[in-house]
């Protein structure tokens, strides 16, 4: 059986957003969702249905009958079932005992029955199904797609992965998991150029070998990528002009990191050549446009380093309930005040997969 | 460690911040007052976003330690500005005992127009409570002086970036 459709990813969103998505899914499946927040309103029965147009115009033109912007989902007309009477939503109300006709509507008194106070949904429905269920229970509401989401910054938007995104992500996520598995389960990381479909850097956690607490896989991977970019840039510069003394130092350091990268690449039997078709280190600012694949959800340090590095997307295989900063303990990428946003995905089904 | 010593090392960190690609400097001092590392931000030169002053200092301090373990327990880290969450977590992982910093993230954002992320050092350390050995921190030491360097050096660069 082909498994191309098996790679399913779950986007890690803010808690608020996740609750909204959950509600949407429940409603779509015909399940009960939390009841809406209700508020008081005044309605009245129309004595003659033929006056509907006149009344609607009067309501539009009467300032005290205007509905606030956030109640745009409410319908004015309620046609009661079985061709029953038509009710009209007159205005919002604050006092449950006050049934006086709103100011400015006096001329319509003889066309309306006695006003009554009712409860209407103040919350905005998140799906068509939810709107229908509230309509049956409270008062007719419309599902307005553009209002059904949270107002989010562009970077925090929900992203639907395309089929080719899924295939690519599945491939690299399996690769990074395999890399980790073949090194006693040490954390592993890959940085990938998605358009050229090539691995730019791959790293393992080397905290124990190097005796350095900061050598997490994602950190090493970012360092390798940056070193690689710097190395290429400097050698291009050196071709053009004699390199200044200061650049030589940086180049040496970059070379060292580069060698480390290469030794790992050799060790893992997958040495990338220096020439990446489609990846242009000279014009790449940090990791802009690159994707990171991690065997384990990153800690806050690595998550922030990924943020600083401007990666495009982060995929991780297993969550880290104790230290994870992209879903488990914190959701740094959902923070309101970021100068860069990346999308985070994890396996919808964290079951290990045969490939 | 006394306030006087804190100010002395903070002044050194501020001096270092003037050398950085971005105006941040950091000093790590061990329990006996011996300086293990002096570093500044090299993010632009290395084209590496993780080369913050604090990160560089921790990397250097590792090699200054005799047993090469990078266990910085008992050390104090001075930073001209409040560590970002990456550096804050790095401080937790490298077991630094005490942190002293000058300009707070809040003022870096409001007064120096820095694109800092408003997650405070305290917040990170609190969240890392079960593992952290960082038991004490002081903020706002020589804050105005530290901020002055940031304003002077970073503002023209931010304008350039716009």
Image: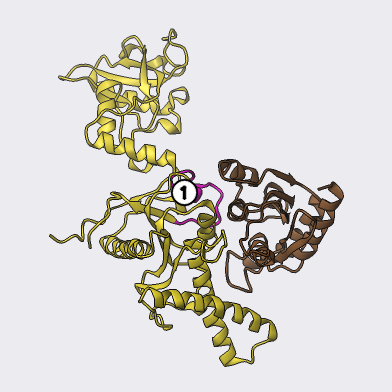
Residue at horizontal 37 percent and vertical 73 percent from the top: A268
- Chain of the residue where label 1 is placed in the rendered structure: A
> Residue A241 at x, y = what percent?
62, 91
Residue that sits furthest to the right in the current view: B4
Q: Does the magenta stretch include residue A209?
A: no
Which residues make up the magenta segment? A326-342
Identify the colour of chain B in the image: brown
Q: Residue furthest front?
A: B67
Q: Position of residue B101 (x, y in %)?
A: 73, 51
- Which chain is assigned yellow? A
Q: Mark 1 points at which residue?
A: A324
Residue B103 place in picture, x, y as percent: 74, 51
Residue A330 is covered by the magenta coloring: yes
What residue sits 47% from the left and 62% below the top?
A: A205
Colour setting: by chain
Q: In this view, does A210 lie to the left or right of B42?
A: left
Above or below, B162 against B30 in this view is below
């Amino acid at each position: 059986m082909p498994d191309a459709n098996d790679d399913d990813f779950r986007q890690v969103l803010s808690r608020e957003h996740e609750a909204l998505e959950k509600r949407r899914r429940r409603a779509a499946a015909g399940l009960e969702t939390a009841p809406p927040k209700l508020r008081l309103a005044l309605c009245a029965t129309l004595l003659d249905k033929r006056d509907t147009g006149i009344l609607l115009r009067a309501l539009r033109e009467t300032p005290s009958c205007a509905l606030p912007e956030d109640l745009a989902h409410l319908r004015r007309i309620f046609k009661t079932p079985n061709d029953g009477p038509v009710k009209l939503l007159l205005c919002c109300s604050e006092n449950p005992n006050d049934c006086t006709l709103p100011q400015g509507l006096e001329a319509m008194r003889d066309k309306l029955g006695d006003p009554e106070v009712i409860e209407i949904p103040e919350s905005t429905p998140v799906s068509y199904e939810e709107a229908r269920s509230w309509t049956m229970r409270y008062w007719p509401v419309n599902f307005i797609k553009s209002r059904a989401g949270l107002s989010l910054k562009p970077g925090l938007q929900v992203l639907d992965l395309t089929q080719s995104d899924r295939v690519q992500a599945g491939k690299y996520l399996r690769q990074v998991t395999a890399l980790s598995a073949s090194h006693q389960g040490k954390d592993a990381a890959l940085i990938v150029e998605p358009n050229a479909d090539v691995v730019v850097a791959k790293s393992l956690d080397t905290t124990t070998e190097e005796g350095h607490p900061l050598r997490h896989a994602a950190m090493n991977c970012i360092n390798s990528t940056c070193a690689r970019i710097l190395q290429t840039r400097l050698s291009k510069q050196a071709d053009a002009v004699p390199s200044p003394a200061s650049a030589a130092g940086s180049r040496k350091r970059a070379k060292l990191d580069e060698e480390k990268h290469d030794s790992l690449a050799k060790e893992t039997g997958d040495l990338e050549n220096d020439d990446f078709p489609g990846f242009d280190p000279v014009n790449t600012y940090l990791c802009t446009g690159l994707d990171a694949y991690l065997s384990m959800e990153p800690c806050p340090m690595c998550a922030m380093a990924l943020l600083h590095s401007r990666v495009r997307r982060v995929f991780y295989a297993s969550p880290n309930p104790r230290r994870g900063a992209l879903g488990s303990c914190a959701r740094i990428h959902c923070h309101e005040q970021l100068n860069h946003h990346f999308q985070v995905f994890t396996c919808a089904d964290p079951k290990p997969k045969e490939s | 460690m006394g306030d006087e010593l804190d100010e002395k090392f903070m002044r050194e960190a501020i001096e270092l911040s003037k050398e950085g690609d971005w105006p941040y400097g950091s000093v790590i001092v061990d329990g006996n007052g011996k300086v293990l590392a002096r570093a500044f931000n090299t993010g632009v030169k290395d084209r590496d976003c993780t080369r913050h002053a604090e990160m560089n200092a921790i990397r250097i301090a590792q090699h200054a330690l005799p047993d090469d373990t990078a266990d910085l327990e008992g050390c104090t880290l001075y930073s001209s500005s409040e560590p970002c969450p990456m550096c804050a977590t790095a401080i937790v992982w490298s077991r630094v005992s005490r942190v002293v910093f000058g300009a707070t993230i809040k003022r870096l954002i409001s007064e120096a127009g820095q694109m800092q992320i408003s997650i405070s050092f305290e917040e990170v350390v609190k969240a890392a409570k079960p593992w952290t050995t960082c038991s004490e921190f002081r903020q706002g030491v020589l804050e105005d002086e530290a901020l002055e360097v940031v304003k002077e050096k970073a503002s023209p660069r931010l304008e350039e970036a716009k």
